[in-house]
Amino acid sequence: MSVFTSSRAVKVLGGIAVASISAIVLAGCTGAATDSASEAPSSEERQELTLNIGTVLPQTGALAFLGPPEEAGVGLAAAEINEAAKGITIEVEYGDSGDPDNKAYETTVPRLLGNDVQALIGAASSGVTKLFLDQAVGAGVITFSPANTSPDFTDWDDNGLYWRTAPSDLLQGEVLGNLIAEDGHQSIGIIYLNDAYGNGLESALTETFEGTGGEVVASESYNAGDTNFSAQVSTIMAQNPDAIAVIGFEETSTIVPSFVNSGFDGANFYFVDGNTSQWGDTMPVSIEGSKGTQPGPVLADDFQDRLKAQWLEQGDGAELADFNYAGESYDAVVLLALASLAANSNEPADIAASLQEVSGGSGDGEKCESFTDCADIILDGGVADYDGYSGGVAFDDAGDPTEATIGVFQYGADNTHTRLD
């Protein structure tokens, strides 16, 4: 594994070709230092807290495959926090985000806000979150996404109420561009979804790959809901690229065959977190040898087993096939609970004011790796620095994680991927 460290969190550093990439860890500055937490209340002053959380995660739409691992992560964290009995109880109300086409969030978000949740977990799609974030901010409720990657959220006018455990696309685009260059490709074509997610990744990928000396010979966009990609395929194929990066979601299973049927080698595709899926038989052509990137470190076997058991119960007996953003979802709930304990309050503004501290962003906490251990530190009057399944987190002043990992995956003969170590 190669490790790349920068003091500028999630910034693209063009011109760097990493020698051997399987996962890249970014450890950045945490922004301006914050004052240490005020003295924790004594046990006599502490109140029993209830934290009501609503999920706005994809049960339907183009990102529905991300829903089960994300909801399992939320459910597992809530169950383990409640079992720990540390003075806080988590109640979860699940809701569908859908996507910008079916607009399920338009029903879900008002319902959850009307039920007085203190925090929304979601959405998975950056484009969906943009459509309801101002509504949540206006209601004074925290929005905490486990999967938003658009750089636009860094500067959003959110009154300190927006947080995420997924790194910005600036980092994933950097990793992907260096990976393609390291694999020996000198020219690439890009086909990308024309939305906040696709535009951000396309820009970061282009800047990084061209910074290594490579050339983006064609870059073609498409719109959500499109089913015919022949024009984009023809334009890109006419430039004869060495490799093709596909930035999108479930429509990838239509886009890729269009290229292969036009003569492109199925081993030379590169995917991103939105489509690095366990395609299997749903991909009608072979993509053996192709690669993809996803945020998140390797998940421990015991965590995967707990997630599977949680989803068997929570998902009406369904088996959990993917773990995309499960760790980020779990950590979102744990961080909210720890911030509530640290503030001795379930008011959203109070919780938000403590999130940077419990993530280690203030730089003066005691390291801990479970809710129970971190809660004990807080209850004993200390400052906890939670390192979770998504990584070290360490929020900056904008609510972005400054420590993140991007994993690289490669597809085998059965069109399913394994992580490269």
Image (spheres, helix red, strand yellow):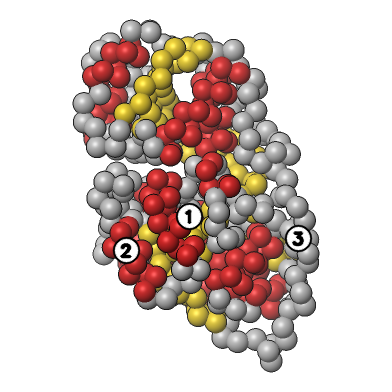
Q: In the image, is 71 to the left or to the right of 254?
A: right
* Residue at mark 1 to residue at mark 2: CA–CA distance: 15 Å
Q: Which mark is residue 34?
A: 3
Residue type, numbered disc 1: Ser
Circle 1 Cα neighbour tier, 10 Å, few/some/many (<14 / 14–19 / ≥20) = many
Residue type, numbered disc 2: Thr
The residue singled out by tag 1 in the image is 145
Which sits earlier in the primary sequence, circle 3 or circle 2? 3
Which element type, helix, strand or loop, lies under badge 1?
strand
Please state the horizontal and vertical placement of residue 382, each as a whole percent of the image: 75, 72
Q: Nearer the viewer, mark 3 or mark 1?
A: 3
Which element type, helix, strand or loop, lies under badge 2?
helix
Q: Residue 108 carries which label?
A: 2
Which sits earlier in the primary sequence, circle 1 or circle 2? 2
Q: In the image, is 345 to the left or to the right of 195?
A: right
* Residue at mark 3 to residue at mark 1: CA–CA distance: 23 Å
Residue type, numbered disc 3: Thr
